[in-house]
Image (tube, helix red, strand yellow):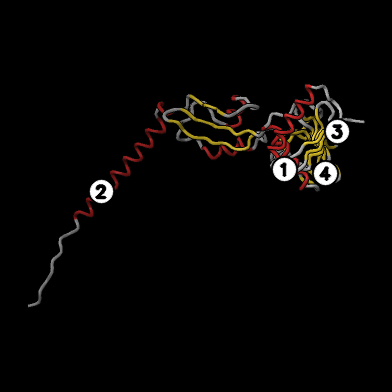
Amino acid sequence: METKVYQFPHKKKRHSKFGVWIIITCIFLLIFYLVNTDIFIVKNIEVTGNYYLSEKDIISLAGISPGQNIFTINLDKIRTNLLENPHIKDIKIRRSLPNSIIIDIDERNVVAAVPYSGVYLQIDEDGVVIEVSKEYQDSSMPILSGLKVKNFYVGKKLDLENISEFNKSLAILKGLKENKMEDLISEVRILDGSISLISSTGLMIDFNVEKNIDYRLSFLKSVLLDLSSKNYKEGHIIVDDVGNIIYRPNQ
């Protein structure tokens, strides 16, 4: 007689499927509770890092409606909405349970005004156009002249012919801001491939420096302050790559 093997019914599998349905049901009930309970209704929106844009403007741009559940808010959509504003360079947004949204703004900082066809293009340190104004509004903001602008769009980098000189100028403008020299330099001028600075008192400064721009500017700042203290308001300054700054008074 042949050997026969009898297998027991898989009762455990049936129990296992039943357990899965219980878990799924619990998850749906939990989600329903989280979405409908008042505990997770947004009551506080905290904005940090903003200077130019007000908190009210940012919340309005974000498109967060009062009474929304914190879990139903689409953070990616809020980020997209805010990045459409040219003043905003980057943004971090997160939920802070149970009822707060934290928005951390990285704004673009205006470093210069570019004159173009009767208007002024306000740009940041990346060369992105932030605003267009009919008048030169801020005398503490240097003018960047001599650019060969082909086209521009607000929120985009300038479209230029002389890109190399433009990039050098941006490095200088960034250094001016970091060294708090905006009130000492009124203009960064590009002419025939060379870059000159004009001080607020009228000093002409040759600044064709390729390296250590930030250090050269900090040195130039001390020289300008020294000349101002001695009431030297006219003349010519040469800043070279060797590390020298030469002042020559007008003859």
Task: Residue 157: give its label.
Answer: 1
Residue type pointed to by label 2: Phe
For disc 2, the marked residue is 18
Residue type pointed to by label 3: Arg
Q: Residues within 10 Å of mark 4 (few under 14, many from 20)?
A: few
In three-dimensional space, the C-alpha distance between marks 2 and 1, rounded to whole angstroms, equals 60 Å
Q: Residues within 10 Å of mark 3 (few under 14, many from 20)?
A: few
* Labels 3, 4: front one: 3
User: Within the image, what quadrant is residue 2 found in?
Assistant: bottom left
For disc 3, the marked residue is 248
Task: Residue 249: give its label.
Answer: none
Mark 4 or mark 1: name the one nearer the start of the chain: 1
Q: Residues within 10 Å of mark 2 (few under 14, many from 20)?
A: few
167 left or right of 28 in image? right
For disc 4, the marked residue is 194
Observer-nearest of 91 and 8: 91
Observer-nearest of 111 and 4: 111
87 left or right of 247 in image? left
Residue 33 in view: yes
